[in-house]
Amino acid sequence: MMFSRKDFLKRLLLLIAFPLFSSVAKAENQPNPRKEDFDVIVIGSGAAGLTAAIFAAKKGARVAVLEKMAVIGGNTLISSGILNAPDPERQKKQGISDSEELFYEQSLQAGQNKSDPELLKTLVQNAKPTLDWLESIGVKFKKRVFQVYGGLWPRSHYPSISHGRGYVAALSEECRKLNIPIITNAQVTEIVKDGDKVVGVKTLHKGKEETFFAKKAVIIASGGFTANLEMCSALDPRLAGMKYTGSPSATGEMLKIAQQAGAKLAGLEDIQCNLGPDIGYVHRSGFHLDVTRHILVNNQGERFVAEDDTRDHIRDAVLSQPDKVVFSVVDKEGFQNLSSLFQQAGILGEREGEHFSAGTLEELAQKMKVPVDNLLKSVRLYNEAVDTRKDSFGRESWMLVQKIQNPPFYAARVKMAVHYTMGGIAINPQAQVLDTSNHPIPGLYAAGEVTTGVHGTNRVGGNGLLDAFVFGRIAGEMAAR
């Protein structure tokens, strides 16, 4: 996947500028209606969409999934794959104390107390059952629980198959078992309503207009708008000129289509950034994902932030650095702990001059073109902080456990990139889409990054996929009723 990413992006550039369709079709005026009417139509084939389809089908509904791309998976496929969930069995073995209450409070505070309390409570209460369900359908996780970048606590689970490939494989296999068709190259252009009720969608399917009717409900699970950089920079001018970390399919046209169907949109200005490749490069290192194993330094070789802070705070700290360019530094163990795809990205990135490796820190500093003495001092002081469990930048003591000391050493040149959109379609805990008066729109549900309210202004690292699975399940079960 990493070898073909550049070509993949080129092939899909046209989708970024795909025109936004906004009219709402009337059911009685549809040309060439399909003979096969479904009970539930799901828009999107990422974690939220496939999960929704599975649980709707398990409730007896006849379901179809519509995917605008030629391949399924969306952002889930190329995500880090990390999932948060308190897990007493795994955590106890590592001496980690956790609870749903702590998970809730940390997530609420990270989002500046602007999450919908009921939505967040639903997320937290369903975290462990979601982990159990994923394992029941064949998704395997590594035994070690850790704290992901922006995760705030060691409750993150890493799938054994790197990135989101294992999720998509398991979910699509469940769809096959349940005879759920996944129709690709089907771009939804309009939401079909009969009076106040949503009864289907109109699409461009392989270039031809085609209508899919839903006897019970439509579920929007189309993802966010991180690839719509024009929209992102208009909402937050600091994002102008940034790259994005996800799929080119995340262009956000369903937001406008849903709005024209009466849906309430909120929080669109809350856009999360994450560390990604510098402008002109394509390989994302992932060196920063395990907070215990890396430090961040600026182009003077100096630390400037607590690496275990929230993602919005780290974003602001990086954007305040000269040239807005920083380096993530790890040692041999930090590199070997990465997934195979992130290791591959590191090797490919080194060939192109965006990643660096060396047998000594002095040599690494020279390759990074930062002052040697400064980098040596930064690493020395950090290692001393590990010994004393006290960090001058405020890193938590439980994140001071791994020294950077064993060669070879690695560094990745990184900038902030658009990563996740917290704003979108307003829903209630039953995943029903709300109108501007906060009333449910009959027959319309939504789940995943296309929605708003779960994360407040800032998403905790590891909560994104959890959101997709939890509310995908709820949306599917509710829609089937």
Image (cartoon, rainbow, N blue to C red):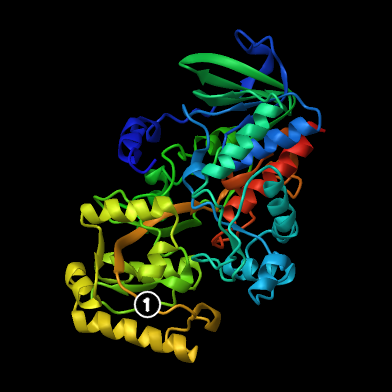
Q: Secondary structure at mark 1?
A: loop
Measured as percent of width and height from the top left, residue 200 is found at: 67, 23
**In the shown orientation, is residue 143 left or right of residue 353?**
right
Figure label count: 1
Q: Amino acid at mark 1?
A: Ile
Does the rendering let one see residue 394? yes
Q: Quadrant of residue 460?
A: bottom right
**In the shown orientation, is residue 87 left or right of residue 10?**
right
Q: Quadrant of residue 170?
A: top right
Q: Residue at x 55, y 66 (%)?
A: 151
Q: Nearer the viewer, residue 310 or 128?
A: 128
Assess disc 1: are there few (<14), some (14-19) or many (≥20) residues with their C-alpha within 10 Å of its C-alpha: many
Measured as percent of width and height from the top left, residue 120 is found at: 69, 59
Q: Nearer the viewer, residue 47 or 426?
A: 47
Please name the residue that numbered disc 1 is placed on: 404
Does the rendering let one see residue 427? no
Q: Is residue 228 above or below residue 409?
A: above
Q: Quadrant of residue 425?
A: top right
Measured as percent of width and height from the top left, residue 420 is found at: 49, 52
Q: Is residue 460 above or below residue 393?
A: above
Q: Residue at x 75, y 30 (%)?
A: 57
Q: Nearer the viewer, residue 67 or 163?
A: 163
Measured as percent of width and height from the top left, residue 355 is found at: 27, 60
